[in-house]
Image (cartoon, rainbow, N blue to C red):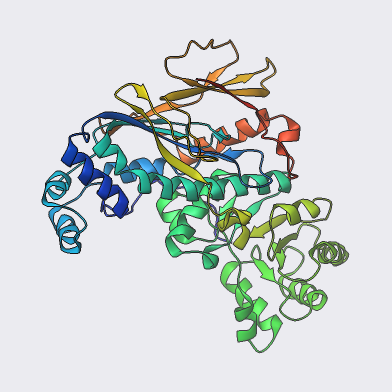
Amino acid sequence: MVPPRVVAVTFPGPSTALLTDQYELTMLDAALADGTAQRRCTFEVFARSLPHGRRYGVVAGVPRLLDAITRFTFDEPEVAVLRDAGAVSDRAAEFLTGHRFSGEVSGYPEGELYFPGSPVLSVTGTFAECVLLETLALSVLNHDCAIASAAARMTTAANSRPLIEMGSRRTHEEAAVASARAAYLAGFQATSNLEAHRRFGVPTTGTSAHAFTLLHDTEADAFRAQIEALGVGTTLLVDTYDITQGIATAIEVAGPELGAVRIDSGDLGVMAQRARAQLDGLGATRTRVVISGDLDEHSIASLRAEPVDAYGVGTSVVTGSGAPTAGMVYKLVEVDGRPVAKRSSSKESRGGAKSALRRHKPTGTAVEEVVHRLDADVEVGEHDRVVPVPLVRKGEPVGELPTLDESREHLRRQLVAVPWEGLKLSRGEPAIPTTFVL
């Protein structure tokens, strides 16, 4: 295994403002034409509901989004692309050239829980500058929140046993990096994605694949080569041929101090029991059993009683375990201090710029989320906490953001505060009820 090591966090990524949609430019063009582009507006990001069966969501991707906003600008070559495509008029092209966001952003900090209607992000400024951020904000938050929400459920199901993110081969190459970060935020211990380590300091670990065993003339030769290169603390993949024989060969080659064996196929619960018994019988009582192979939160929970020391999770975590998007929307809620709201059936929004506070019992258990208009008279009790925090003022980030590890700890504390029934994997009501004061 590669020893975990945290390095300085950086957020390399696109500097181009072409991460937007045509319809945003269409609205910008029309608003510039009729003089409404400079009206002061507030847009909010929220989810109307949680994915089927979920009781909470996890906010993730905030630092990635803020970094992208600070580099969201149109230079002359990019504006030329838009002109050539007929995407903008001369009027809009002039506005976009050199444009930078100069407004304000507030929102839920990374690692916070959210519920239906929670104002996860509020963006305030002119209509022209706010409308341009819709695709950027939603693309980051919908992805990262979905991954972190699924990963948090897996962390709960694992009941303190380590989880390794191994899904890079099951998603887009850039999504793989963001997924590894979001999974680590949600409690995974490490990733196999090396770029996530370089960019974000996520600890890395990994084993070999079946190809390495098949490359050698015998399984023993493959194990011997891996141990000679990486040491006896490595993890050997023992299910290329026969698991029982693979374990016997692994201990014969490595000795009883072998770090771990990984099983990637078969009835994983039964295989884990047999592997543990066999390892103990061979004197390898400290050799760990790592299980992988199409795991999700439900299969992890079903293995809770088995002698499993760690889980490797791939496809399910990088695809949100069936919910690859958080279902968030970006809606205009206020114009020049006047609340506005969409009334379409089943897609209603709630007008007015909002904040939220979370009420807690004296014991620390969260009991209610109160979403309220900024001008509402809402009492903040001794054990209540205002959830949104300032993120951007006059186009510039506010202070130092929490580190990834600090956000990870914040999420751990929030999950501890959730009533126990709110952590169930079964379908039910949101873990904390939401009250709207509008």
Q: Which residue is rendered at x = 58% and y = 44% of the image?
A: 186
Residue 369 position in % (x across, y down): 59, 24
Is 11 left, or right, of 362 in this rendering?
A: left
Q: Which residue is rendered at x = 41% and y = 37% of the image?
A: 331
Is 256 left, or right, of 315 in this rendering?
A: right
Is 295 left, or right, of 128 in this rendering?
A: right
Q: Which residue is rendered at x = 52% and y = 45% of the image?
A: 145
Is 287 left, or right, of 433 in this rendering?
A: right
**Residue 393 appears in view:** no
Total tally of numbered discs in the picture: 0
Observer-nearest of 286 and 337: 337
Q: Which residue is rendered at x = 61% and y = 19% of the image?
A: 359
Q: Is residue 345 above or below residue 292?
A: above
Q: Is residue 34 above or below residue 393?
A: below
Which quarter of the image is occupied by the N terminus? bottom right
Residue 78 position in % (x across, y down): 18, 57
Observer-nearest of 288 and 307: 307
Q: Residue furthest bottom?
A: 217
Residue 358 position in % (x across, y down): 58, 22
**Residue 38 appears in view:** yes
Residue 101 position in % (x across, y down): 25, 38
